[in-house]
Image (spheres, rainbow, N blue to C red):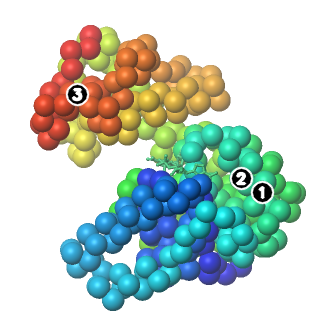
Amino acid sequence: MEIRKVGVLGCGLMGAGIAQTAATAGFDTVVREVSEEALKKGLAGIEKSLAKFAEKGTITGEQQTEIRGRLSSTTDFEPLADCDIIIEAIIENLEVKRETFKRLDELCKPETIFASNTSSLSITEMMTSTSSDRQQRFIGLHFFNPVPLMKLVEVVRTILTSDEAYEAGVEFGSRLGKTPVRAGDKTGFIVNRLLVPYMLDAIRALEEGVGSITDIDNAMRLGCGYPMGPFTLGDFVGLDTTYYIAEIMFNEFREKRFAPPPLLKRMVLAGLYGRKSGRGFYDYTADPKNPVPMNLV
Ligand SMILES: NC(=O)c1ccc[n+]([C@@H]2O[C@H](COP(=O)([O-])OP(=O)(O)OC[C@H]3O[C@@H](n4cnc5c(N)ncnc54)[C@H](O)[C@@H]3O)[C@@H](O)[C@H]2O)c1
């Protein structure tokens, strides 16, 4: 099962990164968006990122041209029909993802592997929108932002995924220059399963007065060697996204460690989403490079 042509659904933050990475790794890549406007925005992001790599000398000018040549874009479904693998990175909405996979299932060749980059939804629930043959060729490929730089991909299998399709997914991850890790279809996979309770615990520690925002961040950064503390990380990821994932994980496992603490809920209700809204655990509005901790408890 050799993968030559790659389809990517969505040219947003993750889709653009995945398409760029696949084209850079030598695959013919076609990326689909819902509108020309969205495509234009996503492709401009790819251009900018490639220019940065060329500036740094990571790729040559010639390679930059070759990568561009391998990448095509569309707002139709038809150009995806002969892809060997299709990676979905559209909005995190189960019904929209199921509808999209159903449509592609009817269009694509029988060998095409379907993969989703979802962070929190069940691969199994998406898979059941496709025919029984396709269900054996359905996997998760969970990349990390920014995709061209982050070296990990979680390769997720359901109880119906065939060994052949799964191993093809693992090998594809390696060919993209990532380290593939194998994970089962349990909400959160490996990284979020461990990371989300840690971030929620940091918020509980803040609520309980164990330490201040700055002290908890410094403690984990300097005491554990983490590149950033839990609150800086939460603001970076987005507190609305963290809350949403925690809710889904709590609904799946019904364990307290996944339950979003009241402070997180209040912050999301108040529009404190982190960096993207200007305020979260820190206030970025005056000087984004030197944010000041918020007075929250
Ligand atoms: N942002 C992250 O850090 C991150 C990390 C890992 C996984 N993910 C997952 O990746 C997926 C995409 O997230 P994102 O952050 O790139 O979102 P985004 O909002 O930046 O991009 C989503 C894109 O999908 C497009 N889209 C919507 N419906 C579509 C359709 N039917 N066909 C094609 N395109 C469609 C939108 O126009 C938009 O450009 C989600 O499932 C998310 O859970 C996100």
Q: CA distance from mark 3 to mark 1?
A: 43 Å
Q: Is residue 39 above or below residue 198?
A: below
Q: Report which residue position mark 3 lands on.
A: 282
Badge 2 crowding class, 10 Å Cα cut-off, few under 14, some 14 to 19, many 20 or more, is some
Would you say the residues marked 1 and 2 are in contact, meaning their CB atoms lie under 8 Å apart? Answer: yes
The mark tally for this picture is: 3
Q: CA distance from mark 3 to mark 2?
A: 38 Å
Say if disc 3 is inside 8 Å of ligand 1.
Answer: no
Residue at image x 78%, y 54%? 102
153 or 81: which is nearer to us? 81
Left or right: 74, with 286 as reference point: right
Q: Which residue is mark 1?
A: 103
47 over 34 or under it: above or below: below
Q: Quadrant of the C terminus?
A: top left
Nearer to us: label 3 or label 2: 2
* Mark 2 close to ligand 1, CB under 8 Å: yes
Label 3 or label 1, whichever comes before in sequence order: 1
> Dividing the image into 4 quarters, which one contains the N terminus?
bottom right
At label 1, the amino acid type is Arg
Lateral position of residue 228 relative to residue 290, left or right? right
Q: Measured from the top left, where is residue 62 in percent x and y?
A: 33, 89
Badge 3 amino acid: Tyr
Asked if residue 102 shows in the view, the reply is yes
Residue 109 position in % (x across, y down): 79, 73
Q: Secondary structure at mark 2?
A: helix
Give the side of residue 252 with respect to residue 57, left or right. right
Residue furthest out toward the bottom: 62
Circle 2: residue type = Thr
The answer, for residue 166, to whether it is visible in the render is: no
Q: Answer with mark 3 or mark 2, whichever residue precedes in sequence.
A: 2
Q: Which residue is mark 2?
A: 100
Residue 70 is labelled as none
